[in-house]
Amino acid sequence: MNGGSPSGFINAPVTRTIVISSALFTILFGIQSRSKNISWSYQDIFKKLQIWKLIVSVFGFSSIPELVFGTYLMYYFRVFERQIGSNKYTVFALFSFTVSLLLQVLTLWLLKVPSMNILTSGPYGLIFSSFVPFYFDIPISTRFRVLSLNLSDKTFIYLAGLQLFLSSWRRSTLPGVFGILAGALYRLNVLRIRRAKFSGFMASFFSRLLSGPTTGSDASSATISTRSRRPPPPAQFRVKPRQFALKHQHRRLVEPGEESISALVSMGFERNAARQALLHAGNDVNVATNILLESQSH
């Protein structure tokens, strides 16, 4: 489904940071069977006031199998960061983490079961929140049958999510449900959250913090990330690609690369529309994405 998109974490520095953090926290607290230290209960939060567990639990998984499925899903869902840009994706991630975590804490307070760890740890909020745009926005590209079952390329993502959802039974299902709810609230644009983004200064700070030293292919990612911090494109970019082409036929256009076209196609745009948008965006994937999104809104 997204096999044609750029490999690795190109143009997805936020996802890369979360994946690396999850792996480090899981391995660190998994040494000598200490993974239970980041599973939290009512007593931990409301009696012992171990707030640090809330922070650690956002990233660290409770087990290596959960880490494997979780990082696979986060790696796959990097397409959403490429689609909306790292700035807005950071807002999406923070909103998903915050809403999911608050609902989990509220559940612990209402249930008040001191002797039972009912919630598992890990970035469940972000992972299951991402299933909402995955369901609505990612098209099916391949369909096939296995025995009498009709399957698609999206089936494997749903199966990986189901495995993670049921990995610890009720300890994992509750964070999963709250993550889906957070994704639904974001899609419904509660408090106009979909319009929120960081200021130029904050975006620049986080971009440098997340990107770090860049060489080779990573340099192109840093360039694109820097471009994504520019102000919204001027009015002439906010028209349909075909109309834009008619207005600017005198400009010399450079044929876009196959990798850039595939990146837009993986987001659900038609190939020809993606090519036209890239032509008039100077092969800038972020600007081309803005062109396509604006054309769909008209």
Image (cartoon, rainbow, N blue to C red):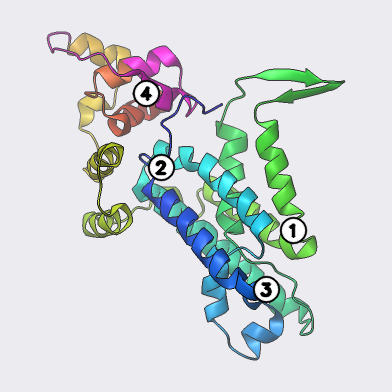
Mark 1 or 2: the one toward you: 2
- The structure residue drawn at horizontal position 24% and vertical position 12%, both measured from the top left corner, is 245
* Residue 225 horizontal/vertical position (percent): 28, 43
Is 140 drawn above or below residue 71 in the view shown?
A: above
Q: Earlier in the sequence, mark 2 or mark 4?
A: 2
Instruction: Tell me how far mark 2 sits from mark 4, CA to CA.
Output: 14 Å
Residue 259 is marked as 4
Along the line of sight, the residue nearer the viewer: 174 or 120 = 120
Nearer the observer, 225 or 98:
225
Using the numbered discs, state the Cα–Cα distance from disc 1 to disc 2 in whole angstroms: 28 Å
Percent coordinates x, y for residue 63 in the rendering: 67, 62
Q: Secondary structure at mark 2?
A: loop
Category of crowding for the residue at label 2, using alpha-carbon neighbours closer than 10 angstroms: few (below 14), some (14–19), many (at least 20)? some
Real-space Cα separation, disc 3 to disc 1, in angstroms: 22 Å
Q: In which quarter of the view is residue 212 placed?
A: bottom left
Q: Position of residue 6 (x, y in %)?
A: 41, 31
Q: Label 2 belongs to which residue?
A: 9
Choose the circle earlier in sequence order: 3 or 2.
Answer: 2
Span shown in magenta: 249-275
Instruction: State which quarter of the image contains the C terminus.
Output: top left
Residue 173: mark in rendering: 1
Q: Badge 1: few (under 14), some or many (20 or more) residues near its Cα, within 10 Å?
A: many
CB contact under 8 Å: marks 1 and 2: no
Amino acid at dot 4: Glu
Q: Is residue 39 visible?
A: no
Q: Name the secondary structure under disc 3.
A: helix
Q: Is residue 274 magenta?
A: yes
From where the camera sits, is residue 158 visible? yes
Q: Which residue is mark 3?
A: 33
